[in-house]
Amino acid sequence: MRKQDTTVKDYYRYCEEIIKKNSKSFYFAFSQLPEDKANAVFAIYTFCRRADDSVDENGSKVRQQEELERLNMELQLFEKGEEIQHPMWLALRDVFNRYNMSIEPFYEQLEGQRMDINFTEPMTLMELEKYSYYVAGTVGLMLLPVLAQGSSIDLTEQAISLGIAMQITNILRDIGEDYHIKNRVYIPQSLLASELYSADHLKNATINSSFIRIWESLAQHAEELYDNFFHSIFYFDEDSRFQVLLAAKVYRGILNAVRKNNYECFHVKNYVSPIEMQKIHQAARFVVNRKVLS
């Protein structure tokens, strides 16, 4: 038994290194969960990271499709209880044994990656939200059984809201990188057209009043989604709500980081500073201790 436990810990340690390397903000928040729950989050994150990397780390569309199909086949084996001997899948097996997990969001996450491979610019906010659901709202659904085991209400809508809000935050942070490196525009075309903000403006990294109105329109929508999530925080497990609230508030803080940098999101990547991180930490702790939303 001791040897088996050590092996499971090794699987989770592999996943912990993945999240520690790729997402300091998520690791900062979720590493403070009880060990079993933290390990489950690390394993789920590793799956999502691999799905994302299958697209981002392969240059050709053919190669991207091959890697995504390989991951899809491995997921099918996992669903059958025939997972391959890899730390991620073995850790996920332990997660599925411990929690009331659903396989569907994992398949939908892969569908989101297919949408990235066959990318088309969203025309409307509704199309952007649909894409954001598949690549990020699904993550909220994966985590929900771990973080809200004892909830007395259905938190599906709130989990999806948080995922979509985080994805829109990513888009607003990475406008320059997406355009110049990935040749992608995630901002809805209808929104760009309403402000007469053209492809040349994007190419020239123009930050004018039109751009700020576009950016703020999406940012304020994301903040509404964050608020929808925040109002449900006390339905999450008591041992998890601080960490969940912290992760959400840190991510929301990226929006203010861009604002403080005068909306410069073309040539720099904005982050929440360590000082702001500490302030957010204290504010989140105050909320859960006092059970009053701030």
Image: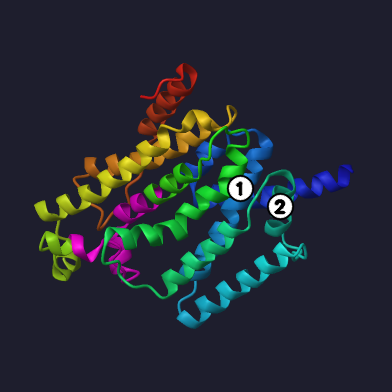
Q: Residue at x 59, y 59 (%)?
A: 104
Q: Is residue 167 left or right of residue 100?
A: left
Residues shaded magenta: 166-191
Mark 1 or 2 closer to N-term? 1
Q: Is residue 161 left or right of residue 220?
A: right
The colour scheme is rainbow
Mark 1 and mark 2: span between their CA atoms? 9 Å
What main secondary structure does the magenta stretch of the protein show? helix
> Which numbered dot is residue 42?
1
Q: Secondary structure at mark 2?
A: helix
- Residue 146, can we see it? yes
Q: How far across and how far down the image is residue 279, in percent?
A: 38, 27
Farthest residue in the right direction?
A: 1
Q: Is residue 244 left or right of residue 205?
A: right
Residue 14 against residue 60 in the figure, above or below: above
Residue 294 against residue 22 in the figure, above or below: above
Q: Secondary structure at mark 1?
A: helix
Q: Amino acid at mark 1?
A: Phe
Residue 58 against residue 10 in the figure, above or below: below
Which residue does the numbered mark 2 point to in the structure image? 91
